[in-house]
Amino acid sequence: MMTRKVKTRFAPSPTGIMHIGNLRSALYEYLIARSRGGAFILRIEDTDRERYVEGAIEVIFRTLSQCGLHHDEGPDIGGPNGPYTQSERLPLYKKYAEQLIAQGDAYPCFCTSGTVSGNEDVDETESFGYNRRCRGIDPGTARERIRSGEAYAIRQKMPLDGKTSFTDDVYGVITVMNKELEDQILLKSDGYPTYNFANVVDDHLMEITHIVRGSEYLSSTPKYCLLYESLGWEIPHFVHLPLIVGEDGKKLSKRHGSTSFDDLIKDGYLPKAIVNMIAFLGWAPGDETEEIFSLGELEQIFRIEGINKAPAVFSYPKLNWMNEQYIRAMPFDTWKKRVQEIADPCFGDRPYDPGKLAEVLQPRVTKLSDIPAMIRFLTGRLPLSRELFYNKRAKLDADKAAYILEAIFPRLQALDEWSETGLDHLLEEAGQALDLKKGQLMGSLRAGLAAQQVTPGGAIETALILGQSESLERLDRVLDFLRKE
RNA sequence: GGCCCCAUGGUCAAGUGGUGAAGACGUCGCCCUCUCACGGCGAAAUCAGGAGUUCGACUCUCCUUGGGGUCACCA
């Protein structure tokens, strides 16, 4: 056992949505495997045919691949312990369920889902869940009823006394009284296993060494341990993860904002930033104070001991910061491409300088989705006002701006080198000629070109993005406006 | 409600009997500056409460309080 190769699995159900919590489980599972030279496998838990969503499996594949979480075995690439889709493993579950019945560790139950729950003589405070009414049915008559075609499910027969303990790698030893355990359904009447059974069978057959999952499974883990024991299987490591909650401390849900990977992408976050963010939700690298890590780096430093027990609040402000870090650090050409994808449709036919725009945007953008609003003043002409030109510190107002723009307009018109240096020289010289500070010229020019007081980038940058002809047209319009008022 | 789990600043957190209780996000201030950012510097802010154990508790034990999870033919 100690020499066994570490193996973890990500076992999502195909619901069509990759929730942040699921993704974090996948990440940690991947990290635990990779950090110990182990294998990471993907298994699809589609045993609830009512919740099955078309195309959901593709969402899973796509998300994992976007995040760089490549698996070693799975439904798409196969592996030594396939199939990796539970609906294709039905005979396996049936076989072990029958073995359990034969051993007396499980029994058929003929109750229908409706008749099971709290009716008749049950004491509300004492009882819970299923009342074990079919537990005492004689095996012979049970077999007879089955043969006659009666529908049945198979339930696990829990010990009535004693207690069960297991050790979780994060939470330590956990003990429960066996009488607290419900005779849970192993095999549903439709022949499909429940998660409670399938996860045990598959994890064993697929040789999973570390079962990593959310802490919501903590309280049902003793039942799984009993199953391992009944089947004579070695109990694997359990690594339960603290829940991810919203700002109000409640389990993260839609009302907290975007909670699925796709939502976050739509919001303009980068996969790498999301992965980095999620890695730190419930885990920390010890004395290390750095927080920006690539997936490869995480593979090196991730340790189970660093996993926390307390629920973690998902912080969008921190995600914003992480995203900014990744945007700032992105190779310029890559960034430029991303910007163009978004800016091109915004500009339409109007020409612009994408390189300059990307340069101006890189230190300022938080999320990609912010870009359209940030560049609206470039993609279209905004309404003018005199207040636009007022700046107390620079001692500027509309009259002063009118004077300045009037003076530099002809120079701009005559400028044949519409470039950083060309414009810079022009403003330098004009400033001297007018006996004004260059900053004042720039302030006026920027406001005039942008028709917006606050802009990403300065006067020259704005002029360059817009190009000479658009810049001159805008200034012409501004001058018109200022003269009229 | 029963059972299980958790508890360091607003948030993520380091810490493992002796520390001035790291760091990050956010917030605030200053610097830089043609605006906004970026960047730099700095500040405020935490051991839920109460009993123990100990020469000494954020660290160990118990209780209280607070929070979360779970009680399906869902996973």
Image (spheres, rainbow, N blue to C red):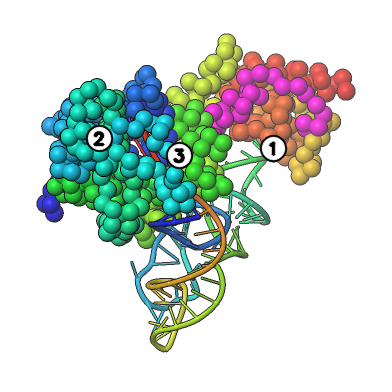
Q: Does dot 3 land on a helix, a strand or a loop?
A: loop
Residue flagged by tag 1: what amino acid is it? Lys
For label 1, count other residues whose C-alpha is less than 10 Å away and answer few (under 14), some (14-19) or many (20+): some
Q: Does dot 2 land on a helix, a strand or a loop?
A: strand
Who comes first in sequence, dot 2 or dot 3? 2
Frontmost residue, A238 versus A347: A238
**Would residue A324 be counted in the magenta stretch?**
no
Residue drawn at point x = 53 percent, y = 34 percent: A254
Q: Nearer the viewer, mark 2 or mark 3?
A: 3
Residue drawn at point x = 77 percent, y = 31 percent: A388
Q: Are marks 1 and 2 on the same chain?
A: yes
Residue at the far right in the pictured view: A485
The numbered mark at residue A119 is: 3
The numbered mark at residue A438 is: 1
Q: Which residues are magenta?
A: A360-389
B6 in relation to A9, above or below? below
Q: In which image quadrant can residue A162 be found?
A: bottom left
The image position of residue A259, as x and y in percent, is 48, 35
Residue hosting label 2: A108
**Would residue A386 be counted in the magenta stretch?**
yes
Q: Does dot 1 land on a helix, a strand or a loop?
A: helix
Residue A193 left/right relative to B28: left
Gap between marks 1 and 3, in whole Å? 85 Å
For label 2, count other residues whose C-alpha is less than 10 Å away and answer few (under 14), some (14-19) or many (20+): many
A133 in relation to A219, above or below? above
Gap between marks 1 and 2, in whole Å? 88 Å
Residue flagged by tag 3: what amino acid is it? Asn
The image position of residue A339, as x and y in percent, is 49, 25
Residue drawn at point x = 54 percent, y = 28 percent: A369
Frontmost residue, A478 versus A287: A287
